[in-house]
Each structure stands twice: as C-alpha cells, then as structure tokens.
Amino acid sequence: MFKTKMNIVQIFRGVDVAARSDKREELKARLIVAARKRIEAQGVRGLRARDITSDAGCALGGLYNAFADLQDLIIHVNGETLDALEARLSAAVSAAGTDPRERLEALALAYLDFAGEHRALWFALFDAASLADTTIPDWHREQQRSLVGLIAEPLRAIETELDEAHLAARAQALFAAVHGIVTLSLEERTIGLSGDPLAHELRTLVRRMTTAQL
Amino acid sequence: MFKTKMNIVQIFRGVDVAARSDKREELKARLIVAARKRIEAQGVRGLRARDITSDAGCALGGLYNAFADLQDLIIHVNGETLDALEARLSAAVSAAGTDPRERLEALALAYLDFAGEHRALWFALFDAASLADTTIPDWHREQQRSLVGLIAEPLRAIETELDEAHLAARAQALFAAVHGIVTLSLEERTIGLSGDPLAHELRTLVRRMTTAQL
DNA sequence: TTTTGGTCTTGAACATCGTTCATCTTCTGC
DNA sequence: GCAGAAGATGAACGATGTTCAAGACCAAAA
C-alpha cells in the first residue's frame, strides 16, 4: 500500500516532488539561517555545531553532509552578509549625488551604519578572515573585490593622474582606513569613538583622503 | 641529616633562598615566555595549554595557579607585546625630526614595521580584543591609551584649533586608520597592499590626514 | 629538630567541543 | 517491486580548557 511511513508524511506535505538536490539545497539554506541567527545572538565564537543542527532540525552529522565543516558554513553565512553589505553600499552611492566626494562619504557612512546594525555578523566577516589555516573560496574573494570596486569608481574621477594599479591601491587603502575606524568604534573595550564624533571623524578622513595635494 | 630529597637539589642549585612569591613569579615568567614562543610559531588560535605547560616545565594545572585561565595568560603576553610596541614607536618619534608631520609619518611606518616583524604576536593583540566575554584589565587599557597618546602629541602641534576632546578623537581616528591599512596588508588572503605601494599609501594617508583644509 | 599549618604542585578526571563513520533509511532508475 | 546509490542519523572518538582531591613542600612555631 504505502511505500514507507516517511513517504506518507512527505506526500502529505507535498515535498515528494522535490528532487534529491532540492532537498539538499533546502537543508543547506536552513543550516545557514540557523547559523546566522546563532551568530547574531551569541557571536561567531559562541557558535556550536549542535545548536545549529538542533535549530535546523537535522542530526549533528547532517551539517557535515551539507558543508565541509563548521568553518565552511560560516563562510557561507559571511557570503550572504557580504551580499547584503554590497546591496546596502550600492544603494547608498545611488542615493548620493553625483559628486565623487559625496559618493565616497556616503559609502563610508553606509559602511558604518551596516556594521553597527549587524555587529555580530560583521565581526564574523573578519574573524574568519583572520583564521590562518582555512582557504577562502574564490567566490568569496570576488565578493570582497567587488566591494573595493565600489570605492574605486568615484575615486577614479578624483585621482585622475593615477594609473589603474595605483588607483586600486588607493581604493584598498581608503577602504582599509574606513574599516579600521569603524572596527575601533565597535569594540567597546577600547575607549573608542562613538556616535556623532565618530561620523564626523569618518567624514573628515574621507574628505582629506580625497583631496589631492603635495 | 637532610630535610628532604628535594631540598638537597634546591640547596645545590642555590634556589633555597628564593622566597615563595619569587618562585611563583618565576613560573609566571616562564609561562609567558613559553606562550609567546608558541604564539610566534603557531599563532594564538593554535595555542594549547598542554603545550605551554610542557614547554615551561610544569604540570597542566600549574597554569591555573599562575593565571586565571588561558585568556589571562594571553593578555599578559599581549601586555609585553604592547610594551615592546610602545618602545619601538617612542624610538621612532625620537629618531624623527621636529616636524610634527614627519613624526607622525615615522610613527605610522614604525607601526607597520613592528606588525610585519611580529605578525603572530601582533595579531594576538587584536584577536583577544575581539573576544566578547573577557574583561580586559585596567593596566592593559592604560597601555593602549598610552599608544594613542604618542599620536596625540605631534597632532596637537598641527590641529591647533581643536580642543582636547576633538584632538583625542582625531588621534584615535588616525590610529585606527593606520591600523586598518596595516591589518589589511598583513592578511594575505585578501588581495592587499604590500611592500613599497603599501608604505606609500600609508605616507599619503598620514600626510593628507594631517593637512587641514575646508 | 620536630611539628604544624597553609600553600603550591600535580595529573587524572570532567565537560564540552568539532568531527567521523558504521548503520539504517530513503530515493532513483530499472 | 528491486537493487544499488545516496543521505540521514547519533553514538563514539579525539582534542581541548578547566577543575580538584591528594600529596609535596616550605616557613615558622614549639
């Protein structure tokens, strides 16, 4: 009559049509969601495989069918975070005026806002990056490159005498500088900047960095 | 005749005069040295309590007599690293000329050099800082403050119209910006700056950040 | 010198991780 | 239906930080 008990449930739920790979992808997605929520709640360092699989509704070993290991799962969470970050930054440049300096300022402030709104996820981004023995996949590197590209574009209009190599270097440096200030401000343990003076310093940095002289 | 077998050895070694607290301090020092060597060799993340105590020549539990936990030991290693860093930066400002901008440039480049020469120790500094649940002791915070103070001093001569609060904010921002660029360059996983262009970007940052306008 | 009391040292035991893998279940193609 | 492949399962493993009861040690009192 009935194939198996499990099939009854699946037919009832209308999942039977789902192909093998679809179920696999669905589990991966559930694991990523669970991992993200845990990171948001307790930070990356507090992430535990048993919590994630429990939340995602699968056995402990299931995580290792979907991903190589916990680090791999974190990288996928980071991938989605980077997507969201780029979307936010893209929106910020679009909303800004046509003046390149305005656009860069908008980028920096949007970066600051995003980091503040998603502290834990944002820290996870660079916590994984500081891990020595894991290899970051190409698609993840490409995401990062794309971020710096957002900066390079307005910068090109300002630093007209710079060739491509130097422009890329300047874009990286500007990104890193903004990143440093934002990072410092989010670590409450060091007496860092916060609130209004923070945004003011960020603006000052961008303005001075984008005004050629000497 | 002899008190105990252990006493013979101690008298022979001339350690008998050492007071209780001296031995305790000596063990702490040995643990810190062992931990530092391990960090230099394998990074903070690869630090293991059993390795350290084995190197230091004490039992596993001995670590927890000398320090609260592994994190506490790491903080003490970081303390010595911060001391060395400040010594290096102080030497750099002294060696530089009297021009405030020159002094700040020298500071930035010395910071870059130090980080490059002590990668693992330097990463340990900020890896611990990003840990959420530990409380950094006051003396450690004071060390960090003192670092930023090195920047504030030449900056005072440049930003004459800034009050103390704004000057402190500017010094923090400048430190954070330089730190961001140095950090990016040391993480080889992201396509970062390196070598000559890196130093050039650093110099550009400092020069532009210290030239008032607008 | 002997005793005594507190302190330090020790390493086995514990709890908690990430990760593996033999076993069973489920799915797909015939 | 059936057989083989693929996936899911969770007990077990190894490694880790941390604890703690038992013993060793030291300085001062007797």
Image (cartoon, coloured by chain):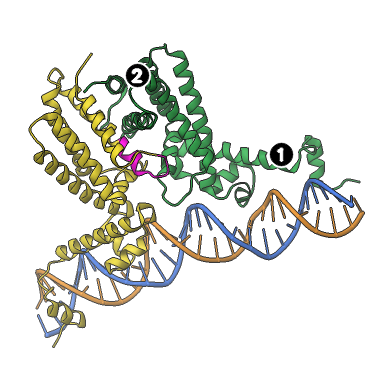
Chain colours: A green, B yellow, C blue, D orange
Spot occupied by residue C8 in the image (x, y as percentages of width and height):
23, 66
User: Which mark is drawn over residue B31?
Assistant: none
Q: Amino acid at mark 2?
A: Ile
Mark 1 is surrounded, within 10 Å at the Cα level, by few (under 14), some (14 to 19) or many (20 or more) other residues, namely few
**Quarter of the picture holding the C terminus of chain A:** top left
Residue drawn at point x = 12 percent, y = 20 percent = B160
User: Which mark is drawn over residue A158?
Assistant: 2
Residue drawn at point x = 27 percent, y = 66 percent = B56
For residue B101, side relative to residue A146 (left or right): left
- Give whichever of A50, B108 is nearer the camera: B108
For residue B81, side relative to residue D8 (left or right): left
- The nearer-to-camera label among 1 and 2 is 2
For residue D30, side relative to residue A82 (left or right): left
Residue drawn at point x = 76 percent, y = 40 percent = A19
Location of residue A170 with respect to A4 vertically, above or below:
above
Looking at the image, tell me whether mark 1 or mark 2 is earlier in sequence order. Answer: 1
Magenta residue span = B180-191
Location of residue A132 with respect to B158 vertically, above or below:
below
Spot occupied by residue B166 in the image (x, y as percentages of width and height):
20, 22
Q: CA distance from mark 1 to mark 2?
A: 48 Å
Residue with the most extreme left position: B98
Which residue is disc 1 drawn over? Answer: A22
Is B186 magenta? The answer is: yes
Spot occupied by residue A61 in the image (x, y as percentages of width and height):
62, 52
